[in-house]
Amino acid sequence: MAPINAHEMLAPLLARMASGDEAAFRELYAVSSPKLFAIARRILGSASLAEDVLQEAYIRIWTSASRFDPALSQPMTWMITIVRNQAIDVRRRTAQRVADRAVELSDVLPDGGAQTSESDRGLDALRLRDCLEALNEQPRAMVLLAYSAGASRQELATHFGRPLSTVKSILRRGLASLKDCLDGEA
């Protein structure tokens, strides 16, 4: 007898889940979670966010199993749609949180043209402003969002549509440039 294709198992598992069969849910999870996790991770660029999305998606799959209609779509297609929509929602919310925290140099440092006191603090702030202005636009925006608005590296990766490793490199180089600039003007 030929082995049963995992996808052929999904429709009956969903039907069993619709009647509250927890064993069917465990089977469905075992068969489908690697593929669904990969999709969520590809959309979000983060394993931890993908795990959260997958958990929420499986809750939705469990509670919606009775509404699955095999005449309308394949089981895996239906589940991929749920995961994909969930991941896109998370990505949008993360990007919006970062955008809401957007920080301009003028928000955190005194105006370079304004008369400030001759205190060391005022001079340091002006030097930092000049060094930040010397950075390219994206590294400057990332540094400001990370260190003035508290955005995480993962939030920056999602907001800028860059891999997490790239964001870490951009931040590291940006901070090194700032340090060099500040040390050079000391």
Image: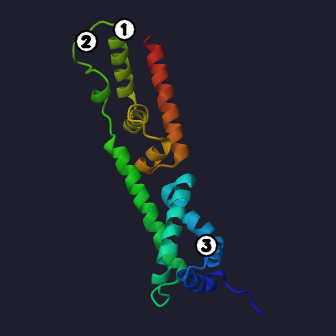
Amino acid type, label 2: Thr
* Mark 3: few/some/many CA within 10 Å (<14, 14-19, 20+): some
Horizontal side, residue 25 vs residue 110: left or right: right
Q: Which residue is tagged 2?
A: 116
Q: At 42% across and 61% down in the image, what residue appears?
A: 88
Q: At 38% across and 56% down in the image, what residue appears?
A: 92
Residue 32 — which label? 3
Q: Earlier in the sequence, mark 3 or mark 1?
A: 3
Is mark 2 in CB contact (under 8 Å) with mark 3?
Answer: no
Q: x%, y% of residue 186? A: 44, 10
Amino acid type, label 3: Ser
**Label 2 element class:** loop
Q: Nearer the viewer, mark 3 or mark 1?
A: 3
Single out the residue that lies furthest toward the left: 114
* Mark 1: few/some/many CA within 10 Å (<14, 14-19, 20+): few
Q: Quarter-wise, where is residue 144 in the image?
A: top left
Q: Which residue is tagged 1?
A: 120
**Label 1 element class:** helix
* Mark 2: few/some/many CA within 10 Å (<14, 14-19, 20+): some
Q: At 64% across and 73% down in the image, what residue appears?
A: 26
Q: At 48% across and 70% down in the image, what residue appears?
A: 60
